[in-house]
Image: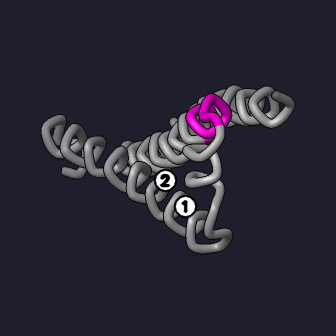
Amino acid sequence: MYLKIFSIAVLITSCYFGDRLLNLNSNHGALLRAITDNLIHGSLAVIIWLLGYMSHVECCQGEERSRHLGNGLARHTVVILQSVACGIVACLVDVDHFLAAGSFD
């Protein structure tokens, strides 16, 4: 339970500081703002993926729980790769929006 509270606090803090960072970059041009916004969305996607995975494991019972927590480093590597893939997909969605809006011109 404490891990979930900590993770939600990290998510809220990341949103707050991400918004502050975007406000700081507003004077440095549209491209820098677009890149910063893209990286913030990607990092939030990683955090949300990890929160979802932790919630799923927390709800599992018995054999299914050991299946998710088993295999030590191999299982953690898979979860980290999944979360990074989620972040990359979130960034790619943003790139499409930036191209449509003409932010890179």
Asked whether disc 2 touches disc 1, contact meaning CB atoms under 8 Å apart, the reply is yes
Residue 76 higher or lower than 35, as above or below: below
Q: Would you say residue 98 is visible in this rendering?
A: yes
Element assignment for label 1: helix
The span picked out in magenta is 54-61
In which image quadrant can residue 25 be found?
Answer: top right
Assess whether residue 60 is covered by the magenta stretch.
Answer: yes
How many labels were placed on the picture?
2
Q: Mark 2 points at which residue?
A: 83
Q: Mark 1 points at which residue?
A: 80
Q: Which amino acid does label 1 sit on?
A: Ile
User: Considering the image in quadrants, where does the N terminus appear?
Assistant: top right
Is residue 27 visible to the viewer in this orientation of the structure? no
- Indicate whether 70 appears above or below 93: below
**Residue at the front extreme of this rendering:** 63
Helix, strand or loop for disc 2: helix
Q: Which residue is drawn at 80% across and 36% down?
A: 3
Distance Cα–Cα, label 2 vs label 1: 5 Å
Return the x and y of residue 26 as percentages of the image width and height.
Answer: 51, 36
Indicate the quadrant where residue 10 lies.
Answer: top right
Residue 17 to residue 66: above or below: above
Q: Residue 103 carries which label?
A: none
